[in-house]
């Protein structure tokens, strides 16, 4: 991963006056490396070896702080656990039906959909989410081996 992204993120933390604890640093670094949009639980499991005293609540707390200063985006899915994304630029997601992995998909923002929705429904649209579902390459090759 790019060291620069981590340095930039640390700078943003410092500028926001947020204390950089070793756990917070590790959560941020893990998120910057993870391409799969982990849940808080995934992050906890990945880091518990390094921080045996850390709880899932600590991970959530750190994610909340990172979200508040705009370093992390939370993707909510009704009752199932939120996924966290440290790519805060506009992009869409492709989700694997089998393993649940979420991959970034870059496509020009569909601004015309937002303006049409404003005209049709009379809403002030703040944002939109577009998700595509399918079977990822890893799962496809596992399936191919089984047949
Ligand atoms: Zn998959
Ligand atoms: Zn993403």
Image (cartoon, rainbow, N blue to C red):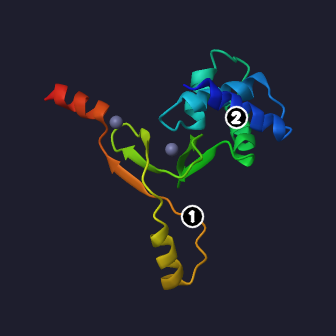
Is the CB–ligand 2 distance for label 1 below 8 Å? no
Going from N to C along the chain, the mark reached first, 1 or 2, is 2
Residue 125 at x, y percent in the picture: 58, 72
Residue at x 64%, y 28% (from the top left corner): 4
Residue in the foreground of this view, choosing between 87 and 83: 87
Task: Estimate the x, y position of residue 37 in percent, counting from the top left.
Answer: 51, 38
Residue 135: image quadrant is top left
Near mark 1 (Cα within 10 A), the count class, few <14, some 14-19 or many ≥20, is few
Q: Quadrant of the N terminus?
A: top right
In the foreground, 128 or 77: 128
Residue beneath the point at 71% across and 40% down? 66
Please, what secondary structure does the residue beneath circle 2 have?
Answer: helix
Image check: 14 left or right of 129? Answer: right
For mark 2, does the 10 Å Cα neighbourhood hold few (<14), some (14 to 19), or many (20 or more) residues? Answer: many
Q: Give the farthest residue toward the right.
A: 17
Residue assigned mark 2? 9
- Disc 1 element: loop
Q: CA distance from mark 1 to mark 2?
A: 24 Å
Is residue 127 placed above or below 57 in the rendered structure? below
Query: Residue 85 appears in which quarter of the rendering?
Result: top right
Q: Which residue is mark 1?
A: 127
């Amino acid at each position: 991963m790019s060291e620069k992204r981590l340095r930039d993120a640390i700078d943003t933390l410092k500028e926001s006056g947020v204390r950089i604890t070793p756990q917070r640093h590790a959560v941020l670094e893990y998120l910057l490396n993870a391409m799969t949009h982990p849940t808080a639980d995934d992050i906890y499991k990945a880091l518990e070896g390094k921080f045996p005293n850390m709880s899932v609540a600590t991970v959530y707390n750190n994610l909340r702080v990172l979200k508040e200063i705009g370093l992390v985006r939370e993707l909510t899915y009704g009752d199932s656990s939120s996924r966290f994304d440290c790519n805060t630029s506009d992009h869409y997601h492709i989700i694997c039906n089998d393993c649940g992995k979420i991959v970034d998909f870059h496509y020009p923002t569909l601004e015309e959909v937002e303006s049409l929705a404003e005209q049709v429904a009379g809403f002030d649209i703040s944002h939109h989410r577009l998700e595509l579902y399918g079977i990822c390459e890893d799962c496809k090759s596992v399936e191919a081996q089984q047949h």
